[in-house]
């Protein structure tokens, strides 16, 4: 019983600690993006306008970005399996496919449909995508 309790505690520390650490170190604008506190934070806030101003600027930049630029940002989650240029690897090659085909496949995965042996990997990936994410990704992949 004691051994199981230790495993549960260690798992909980890992399950909570890893995401918190990742938010602090992911370089994607999350967590402590200015890496300072106290006087340093006051100076950063004076220079940038603070977290709200930075977030508004990031939102404005996303709103002005083209679908291809937004798709490139979303493709970061695809690189590990499909390669940096869609040439494949763990997952199949997707380069050279039309935006229509890519979007249709992503929608099928999002709906939990089986398309092949690695469908289970894609279900969770596609479930996180909005319709506009799918459109932008499809446009980016076709443009590669």
Image: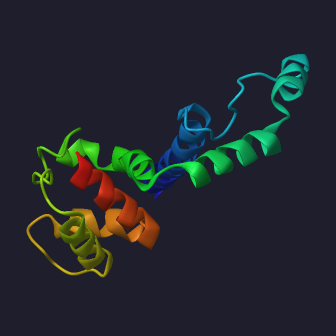
Nearer-the-camera pick, 91 or 71: 71
When the figure is inspected, residue 120 is found, relative to residue 87, above or below; the finding is below
Q: Nearer the viewer, residue 141 or 45?
A: 141
Q: Is residue 93 left or right of residue 72?
A: left
Is residue 98 visible from the viewing direction of this image? Answer: yes
Question: Which sits in the foreground, 74 or 139?
Answer: 139
Q: Is residue 126 left or right of residue 97?
A: right
On-image quarter of the C terminus:
top left
Count of number-bearing discs: 0
Find residue 25 and report its image quarter.
Answer: top right
> Residue drawn at (54%, 46%), measured in percent from left and top?
19
Q: Position of residue 136 (x, y in %)?
A: 39, 59
Q: In this picture, is 10 found above or below 38? A: below
- In the image, is residue 63 above or below residue 117? above
* Rendering coords of residue 109 (x, y %): 26, 74
Examine the rendered structure and indicate whether residue 54 appears above or below residue 113: above
- Could you tell me residue 98's position as x and y percent? 18, 63
The reply to whether residue 130 is visible in this rendering is no
Q: Quadrant of residue 127?
A: bottom left
Identify the residue shown where x is 60% and y is 54%.
63
| Residue depicted at 12% across the width and 74% down the height | 115
Left or right for 10, reference 125: right
User: Colour mode?
Assistant: rainbow
């Amino acid at each position: 019983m004691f051994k199981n309790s230790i495993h549960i505690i260690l798992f909980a520390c890992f399950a909570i600690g890893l995401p918190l650490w990742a938010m602090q170190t992911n370089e994607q604008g999350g967590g402590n993006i200015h890496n300072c506190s106290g006087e340093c934070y006051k100076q950063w806030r004076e220079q940038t306008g603070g977290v709200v101003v930075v977030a508004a600027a990031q939102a404005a930049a996303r709103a002005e970005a083209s679908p291809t630029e937004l798709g490139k940002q979303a493709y970061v989650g695809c690189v590990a399996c499909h390669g940096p240029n869609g040439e494949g690897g763990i997952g199949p090659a997707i380069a050279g496919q039309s935006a229509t085909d890519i979007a249709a496949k992503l929608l099928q995965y999002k709906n939990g449909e089986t398309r092949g042996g690695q469908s289970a990997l894609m279900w969770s990936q596609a479930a996180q995508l909005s319709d506009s994410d799918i459109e932008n990704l499809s446009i980016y992949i076709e443009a590669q």
